[in-house]
Amino acid sequence: MERATEQNLRVAWVLMVISTVLSAILLCLGSFHLWQYFRNPKPLEISLSDYVTNRPSADWLVIKNCEVDYTESVSFRAGEKAALYAPVRSINDGMSPPAIVLKVEDPSVLDLFASLSTLRGEELNKAVQNNREKLLVTGPIQGLRIRKLVFDEPTSSSWTKSPWQPAANYVLIDQDASPSLNRALIQAGSGIGLLLYARYLWGAIRRLRQKLKLPALAQ
């Protein structure tokens, strides 16, 4: 009986630590996304040149006068999903290091990019020409700035394998994303739930320690 109680005590400690850590992470993310939602009631519309010059603090953006060439995209994994990262430049800006990188998870673009990656030589050139309107897009881009607290952002070492390098202090934008109140509330609610569960486990740990006649813990 005492051995089973000791085992239950160890399990309770592990679960409490895990619950507390996850609760802290979810509460931080939920708080950030709530702040982001109320701070960005509508997207800021701005030209690419003005954005690069002034770097406004808004996260939800519509950036005009852009050119995105998907043939230059590089592929990294974003968590469990594949994503493309495409350079955003001013129209006819050549090959300058982009100050904005667009994260693309549009299935149609991913499928097209995957099919092109299997081709070589004349077949590839022909396919690129046939899909030029889809691969070279000019006009505004819309999305949500990804800040560094999000863990799937490519690291600086990731770019060493890329044929192009982003500019220093580049901005990463999640294509077509917008602030989400539902996501913020789910994260915050889950964090609160785990915190309450950790509090329950703390009470269980104290009771198990009393049962084993161990020194009492602080309230």
Image: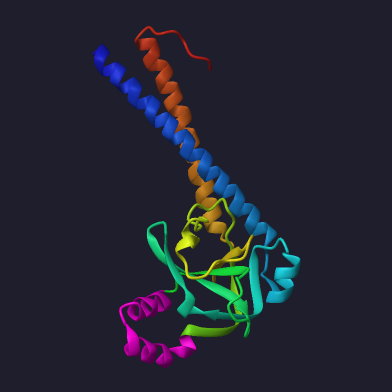
Q: Is 128 covered by the magenta stretch?
A: yes
Total numbered circles? 0
User: How is the model colour-coded?
Assistant: rainbow
Residue visible at 58% across and 77% down in the picture: 95
The percent coordinates of residue 115 (x first, y second) are 33, 80
Answer with left or right where residue 182 lies relative to residue 3: right
Q: Quadrant of residue 130?
A: bottom left
Answer with left or right where residue 52 lies relative to residue 175: right
Magenta residues, as a range? 107-134
Answer with left or right where residue 91 lies relative to residue 14: right
Q: Is residue 165 above or below residue 129?
A: above
Instruction: Kindly report the secondary structure that dominates the magenta region of the rendered protein.
Output: helix
Q: Quadrant of residue 93?
A: bottom right
Answer with left or right where residue 149 lies relative to residue 116: right
Q: Is residue 219 above or below residue 128?
A: above
> Can see residue 146?
yes
Quadrant for the N terminus in the image: top left
Q: Quadrant of residue 79?
A: bottom left
The percent coordinates of residue 72 (x first, y second) are 48, 76
Residue visible at 52% across and 56% down in the picture: 156
